[in-house]
Amino acid sequence: MEFDTDIIVVGGGLNGPVLALALSSAGLSVTVIDALPAPVRKKSGFDGRSYALALASARLMQGIGVWDTLDDKAQPILDIKVTDGRAGEGPSPFFMHFDHAEIEEGPMGYMVEDRHLRPALLKAMNAHKNITQISERRVTGQQTDPTGVRVTLDDGQTLRGRVLAGCDGRSSGTAKRAGIARTGWPYDQTALVCALEHALPHNGVAHQFFMPAGPLAILPLTGNRSSIVWSEKTDAAQRINEMPDSDYLDVLRPRFGSFLGEISLAGERFTYPLSLSLATELVADRTALVGDAAHGVHPIAGQGLNAGLRDIAALAEVLADASRRGEDIGARGTLERYQTWRRFDNATLALATDAFNRLFSNDNPLLRAARDIGMGLINKAPALRRGFIREAAGLTGDLPRLLRGRPL
């Protein structure tokens, strides 16, 4: 049976290119299909979007050959401070402080701007002869048979491969066409996202400030800049987002505080609704889901992209090892190994972020007292602190080789 490619990847955002690079490094041929034009994906201007990459995720980027182009543009996350309180009143005296010096591996992670990460992935894909890119095309159909999968594009073109990988987000067409259902619920919260310039240095410290309406994450970027992910009730978020920049900042300042001096906006402002969305299965016949196509969680711990990169490292290892053994890489038994590996971890992350959001996004005095005491106790327990630090760095659990800094 003839195949156009070993793996067909639907979605060219971040997860799709990373998966393609991981698989191609193992000698597999990959075709990446994306609906956006290539020039849009290569856009290099700063628009405020940034990502928190755990230390293990940075190892994966090194393994697929892109970290060397990102290293000098990435901001190390050296400390994380977690506090609780109300806007304008300052944080509670109970807090958690996680210092990267408590582990031997290095920074807990890095902040990388979208304008650097996306072009680096595209440049790396262009350099791989095993990767074919198809832009400005949508998948309109997919059919599987005992030996492979065929996809149909909106221009009538068809492609045949051994495996179909859905990297096409929470509304994954790949999942729908494969008959995979989703479960989840909205949070009645919306994230307001922007970048700020500030007068004082952040010293590589990330802050998570829990307020009754939702958490505020202040994440360090290079220079005197920080990325903001600010969760509010949806109605309030809509009103805030409609404000001019000066009024927007006036609402933000009591929440942000004055510890970094005067602040101003840098780049564009964004919003996105917050919800929990889980695929009931990670695999179907000849099909595997990765990243948001498999699981969309609350950004409370900044682990959404990192969870997707764990999916990629696991799927790439399963497929690469199966190929080396001469197995059918698209057989249901092969893909089930990936599902078994990632299902529990993804479900645990979803439940943990959901529970944390429900625990902290309220003003119940009993819950507030309980969580403040809990944070204080954790902060005074070195073993617990190190456990949280290693979790934030992505160093816990059954890690695939790429996340351990080993070749695929």
Image: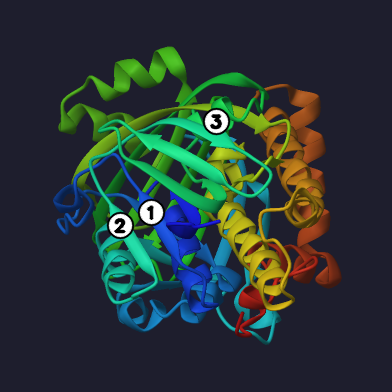
Amino acid identity at mark 1: Val
Amino acid identity at mark 2: Gln
List the residue tagged with mark 2.
133
> Could you say where residue 250 lies in the image, as x and y percent from the top left?
26, 32
List the residue tagged with mark 3.
214
Callout 2: few (<14), some (14-19), or many (20+) C-alpha neighbours within 10 Å? some
Mark 3–mark 2 Cα distance, whole angstroms, equals 40 Å
Classify residue 353 as left or right of residue 366: left
**Looking at the image, can residue 221 be seen?**
no
> Could you say where residue 315 lies in the image, as x and y percent from the top left?
65, 60
Q: Residue at x 76, y 68 (%)?
A: 396
List the residue tagged with mark 1.
32
Mark 1–mark 3 Cα distance, whole angstroms, equals 37 Å
> Could you say where residue 399 lies in the image, as x and y percent from the top left?
73, 70
> Could you say where residue 52 lies in the image, as x and y percent from the top left?
47, 59
Name which of mark 2 and mark 1 comes first in the sequence. Answer: 1
